[in-house]
Image: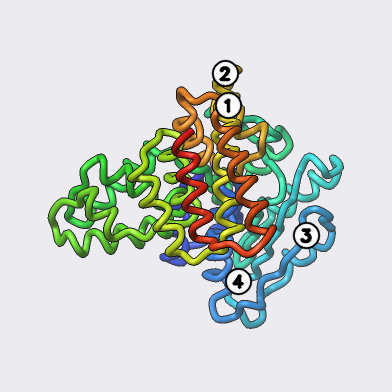
Amino acid sequence: MAVVDARGLQEQVKNGRFSNLYYLYGSDVAAVEQNTARLLKAIAGSEPDSITKLDGTDLDVSRLAEEAELCPMLADYNCIRIHDCNMESLREEQRKALLAVAEQAAGQTILVFDVTGFDVFGGKTGKNKKPTAKNKTLIDFIAKHGTVCCFEPKSQSQMISDITAMAKKRGCTIDRPAAVSLAAYCGAQTLQLRQEMDKLCAFADGGEITEQMVQEMVVPQLDTAVYRLTDAVLRHHAAAAMRCVNELLAMRVETSYLLAAVAGSLTDVQRAAAARLAGKTVQDMTADFSYRFGFAVENAFRTAAGEQPEHIAHCLKLLRDAEYRLHSGAVDERVLFEKTIVEMLRQ
């Protein structure tokens, strides 16, 4: 067996050719959760209750050994999910016993280890980061005898490459500005990206997907629309900012939540601006503030180029004042939000 990417894991699920051992982990926690659920559903088939679930944070290795020896009665497989098992937290004899259970897994027994509740990398960042020593022992064993899949958030350049490949596979082409816009609209939401590409390619019908088509047809997510608004405001692009305002208001999100979302996006940029001044990297900021997705940090670093923290702080003050007015009396919430953005553009 081997280490596979998300596509390789999906092929196993699709074809029903399962390993006896799985280990799913990575910084993209949402992707770990989604793919674990998809894998377990495929293994369980028509017997969803046949999966045995064990809490890895308080793992009883003796019980795991007993469960692993059972034969399935109604389901095709004896599948055991071990969630959030941190080898660093186990005693040496527990680690040895766990590896022995994994080594004996065969036939209809499938062990699925998935991690979303702790950092397998032990806080390490950067391209060369590796799992901690004791967790790596289990991961390497499963990579040799089963299937390991690590889910890491993709950079914007990787997403653009994926978008280009998706278009080509569907018989279309897409220019770079359109790919950049689509990546910004979809952020780290790979499912939404596939759905939007299906729609765009169907409309293009073998032709070219343009930036105008993306802007007219793709429905932005709240977080990506907020980011584009933040970027437009700080760059004093009034027309683009007001288009984003209209998009956000059309989502019918509560004004207090909108103000908080914009403030959160500006806080990301403020952190990035301070990090730039201190000579820090995207990886440093991702680790220091425990961001789940590097994509947001990359965007913040890009927007922060040339920005001073004082300017961002003043914009945050305007949002704070708007929040105060919102809860101090009767106001037209739409007008309040629009006026606040206009005031920010004037700074």
- Disc 2 residue type (three-letter): Leu
Give percent across and percent down for residue 169: 23, 53
Dot 1 crowding, Cα within 10 Å, few <14, some 14–19, many 20+: some
Q: Secondary structure at mark 4?
A: loop
Asked which quadrant contains residue 22, the reply is bottom right
Which residue type does callout 4 highlight?
Tyr
Mark sitting on residue 277:
2
First in sequence: mark 3 or mark 4? 3
Asked whether residue 111 appears in the rendered view, the answer is: yes
Classify mark 3: helix, strand or loop: strand
Q: Nearer the viewer, mark 3 or mark 4?
A: 3
1 or 3: mark nearer the eye = 1
- How far apart in space, not on screen, are marks 4 and 2 (Cα)? 55 Å
Label 1, label 2: how many angstroms apart (C-alpha)? 9 Å
Question: Residue 100 placed where, x, y %?
Answer: 74, 50
SS class, disc 1? helix
Residue nearest the observer in this picture, 5 or 346: 346
In the picture of the structure, the residue carrying the numbered disc 4 is 77
